[in-house]
Image (cartoon, grey):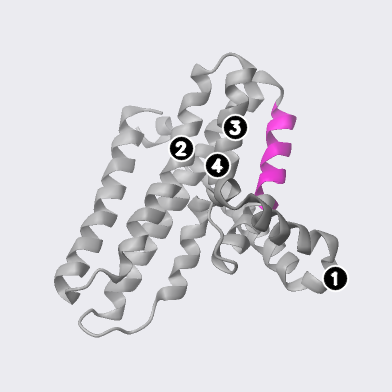
């Protein structure tokens, strides 16, 4: 990652934090404090992805990839925090909308950057086809992970603290797919949306040379 991109990411995170603390001053409350935590979770996959190039041995890279995959859904998950938008006393609704969008776009940017790094690592060690196949596989897994987090209220670390209960929640839609048609519809639509957004982010954005 170039120093310029790194500084832009720090600036985006600080901007989100500034909006949140401004809201605290306006409202006198800390209702949206969970957004700071969600943004931190969204940044973790990028941290794991940045460590990948330093892991030349597969035995070290595989745990990083597993951690990345486990926490990656936290990045696009922040988009669903828009569900909390409603008029509240003391703060204009447009301010909350701006704040939530800022957190959402920043988290998605962090997530996509981590996905790009993982995709690049896989392409270098295997092939470009394998790397793109990984992207196609990750998106529905992410959509399902967002469903688990938003609607069933599971967290990434529950795989360690409550593994059996989490496995039951995951197994139910797999064992009875027709009874959980809405779950699969949400998963597929979310996967399609994220795939389209990622493709636009990868191919439509100008390169650094074009900007310069």
* Among the two numbered marks 3 and 1 on one chain, the one whose residue lies closer to the N terminus: 3
Q: Which residue is mark 3?
A: 65
Q: Which residues are magenta?
A: 128-140
Q: Which residue is mark 2?
A: 46
Q: Which residue is mark 4?
A: 202
Q: Nearer the viewer, mark 4 or mark 2?
A: 2
Q: Position of residue 67 (x, y in %)?
A: 56, 37
Q: Nearer the viewer, mark 4 or mark 3?
A: 3
In the picture as drawn, the residue positioned furthest to the top comes out as 56
Tell me the number on the disc at residue 80.
none
* Quarter of the rendering containing residue 36: bottom left
Q: Which residue is mark 1?
A: 178
Q: Residue, x 49% and y 17% (percent of image)?
A: 54
Which quadrant would the N terminus be assigned to in this image?
A: top left
Q: Position of residue 98 (x, y in %)?
A: 32, 68
* Quarter of the rendering containing residue 123: top right
Q: Residue, x 49% and y 45% (percent of image)?
A: 111
Q: Position of residue 160 (x, y in %)?
A: 57, 45
Judge the density around disc 4: few (<14), some (14-19), many (≥20) Cα neighbours within 10 Å: some
């Amino acid at each position: 990652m170039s120093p310029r991109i790194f500084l832009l990411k720090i600036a985006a995170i600080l901007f989100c934090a500034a909006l949140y603390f401004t809201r605290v001053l306006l409202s006198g409350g800390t209702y949206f404090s969970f957004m700071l935590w969600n943004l931190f979770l969204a940044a973790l996959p990028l941290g794991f992805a940045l460590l990948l190039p330093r892991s030349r041995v597969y035995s070290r890279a595989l745990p990083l990839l597993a951690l990345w995959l486990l926490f990656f859904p936290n990045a696009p998950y922040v988009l669903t925090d828009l569900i909390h938008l409603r008029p509240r006393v003391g703060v204009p609704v447009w301010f909350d909308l701006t704040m939530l969008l800022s957190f959402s776009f920043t988290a998605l940017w962090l997530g996509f950057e981590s996905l790009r790094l993982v995709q690049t690592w896989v392409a270098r060690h295997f092939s470009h086809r394998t790397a793109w196949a990984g992207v196609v596989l990750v998106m529905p897994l992410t959509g399902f992970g967002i469903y688990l987090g938003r609607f069933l209220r599971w967290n990434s670390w529950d795989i360690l603290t409550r593994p059996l209960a989490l496995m039951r929640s995951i197994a139910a839609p797999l064992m009875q797919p027709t009874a959980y048609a809405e779950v699969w519809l949400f998963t597929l639509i979310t996967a399609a949306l994220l795939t389209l957004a990622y493709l636009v982010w990868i191919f439509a954005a100008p390169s650094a040379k074009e900007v310069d």
